[in-house]
Image (tube, rainbow, N blue to C red):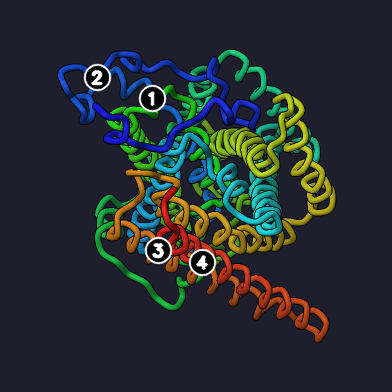
Amino acid sequence: MPPEDNQVPLLSDEESDQDVAYESGEKVHIVGIDEPEDEGLLGTPPFSWKKLWLFTGPGFLMSIAFLDPGNLEGDLQAGAIAGYSLLWLLMWATVIGLLVQLLSARLGVATGRHLAELCREEYPTWARMVLWVMAELALIGADIQEVIGSAIAIKILSNGAIPLWAGVIITACDCFIFLFLENYGVRKLEAFFAVLIATMAVSFAWMFGETKPSGTELLLGVLIPKLSSKTIKQAVGVVGCIIMPHNVFLHSALVQSREIDHTKKGRVQEALNYYSIESAAALLISFIINLFVTTVFAKAFYGTEVASTIGLVNAGQYLQDKYGGGLFPILYIWAIGLLAAGQSSTITGTYAGQFIMGGFLNLKLKKWLRALITRSFAIVPTMIVALVFDTSEAALDVLNEWLNVLQSIQIPFALIPLLCLVSKEQIMGTFKIGSVLKTIAWLVAVLVIVINGYLLFDFFSNEVTGVMFTSIVFAFTGAYIAFIFYLVSWGFASSAWRRLSPSK
């Protein structure tokens, strides 16, 4: 068979001096990867449960961003304020998240490079530096929420003996757990995350069993779309927190942890198929866990006077006041689930930070040093936050709103490059997305950006006061919109230019 008949993006040995997500010795060996394509079989190899098991892992690490403390807070507030009425939106938001993450995985598998690396290679220096700064800001914002969530859980489990700032220090040490486990291989690290996800599932399922939400209302909430003016803010929050910018970068790197023969189209398609299955399964589990949290707080606090005051800090105590007693206090069950969510998401944040920094800057640093730098970016501001806001629940809620805004601002700077790159034949080869999927993906991106734009407008219209502050916000908004238009126009213009350029 002539090589051009099976052409896909290749990895050359010339790129060995470049920073890579995984060295060849770190990758999981896939059974049959070295087998020759016999009998003229050019299609995808038949399905194998054993291979599915070997490919399972990256999707579950990716799904942790759907279960971080920020998402849990969005879940409990949606349940307490909107009851069961937004469960349908939670389901479809998860589907949207799955689509985005599958595109991210597609980019990583087809090219053998992750999103940050491709941004470095494709964009002008000034643009990729802006994208890098935006990605780091999004990561820091997410990490602060995750570390604070863990610190809150530690404070609850210690009966207040360990203050918030001490919990932050304890959580900061998880990067060393990450480094320790990574030395034993990718599969050991993935098993550790599987235990944390199982801990969340058991904890929140236990809460679901103790509070006994209505099965009928749950089913109606999932199947029947319902939205009112009183719950629009919670609805925006449900959709807004599903797309995490750093997670888009992360998944495109995680999928490179398996051996894939990029010279064989069938093997690349096989990897895409298995990753699609395991990612869908992982997000189904994350949806069920989010469903547990939302319905527990819908059952307990919907229609009550305290519904609008519930947040991560006081949620456990409110549950304990209403459902105290039992075999194991529900306060501690909540704290265990929250701790698993915080710990798992902070470690994946460290992981994502390594890929983002290494990809954009092409830094060839030792993993422990890169993890330490990445962790320091988030821990220093988090320590300041913990010391300043330790005694004020209301202040922590305000801070959380600002952090949500920070991450919402960054969403276009992960989504737009992803969609532009995954649509280019010069980058993706035969695995570029088709016109139908491209249209759907751009519509989803516009929907997510508009929804987050509404969140930003609503927030700033309430918070921005004074001529100077207003002028700064307007100037920032103008530059922000201009850069979004640049990213979109660059994507379409470069594709058109390459199509018109004569082939060499």
Side of 366 where 444 appears, left or right: left
Q: Residue at x 47, y 26 (%)?
A: 194
Check contact, mark 4 vs mark 2: CB within 8 A: no
C-alpha separation, residue under disc 3 versus residue under disc 1:
30 Å
Residue 470: image location, x then y, percent:
75, 82
- On the image, numbered disc 4 is attached to which residue? 488
Give above or below for 454 relative to 124: below
- On the image, numbered disc 3 is attached to which residue? 442
C-alpha separation, residue under disc 4 versus residue under disc 3:
11 Å
Q: Earlier in the sequence, mark 2 or mark 3?
A: 2
Q: Earlier in the sequence, mark 3 or mark 1?
A: 1
Quadrant of the image occupied by residue 32: top left
The residue nearer to you, when weighing 268 against 94, is: 268
Query: Which amino acid type is shown beneath numbered disc 3?
Result: Trp
Q: Earlier in the sequence, mark 4 or mark 3?
A: 3
Q: Residue at x 60, y 54 (%)?
A: 123
Is residue 234 in view?
no
Q: Nearer the viewer, mark 4 or mark 3?
A: 4
Q: Which mark is residue 261?
A: 1
Side of 291 where 257 appears, left or right: right
C-alpha separation, residue under disc 2 versus residue under disc 3:
36 Å
Q: Which mark is residue 37?
A: 2
Q: Nearer the viewer, mark 4 or mark 2?
A: 2
Quadrant of the image occupied by residue 403: bottom right
The residue nearer to you, when weighing 348 against 10, is: 10
Residue 390: image location, x then y, percent:
79, 49
C-alpha separation, residue under disc 1 versus residue under disc 4:
32 Å
Q: Earlier in the sequence, mark 1 or mark 2?
A: 2
Circle 3: element type: helix
Check contact, mark 3 vs mark 1: CB within 8 A: no
Which quadrant would the N terminus be assigned to in this image?
top left
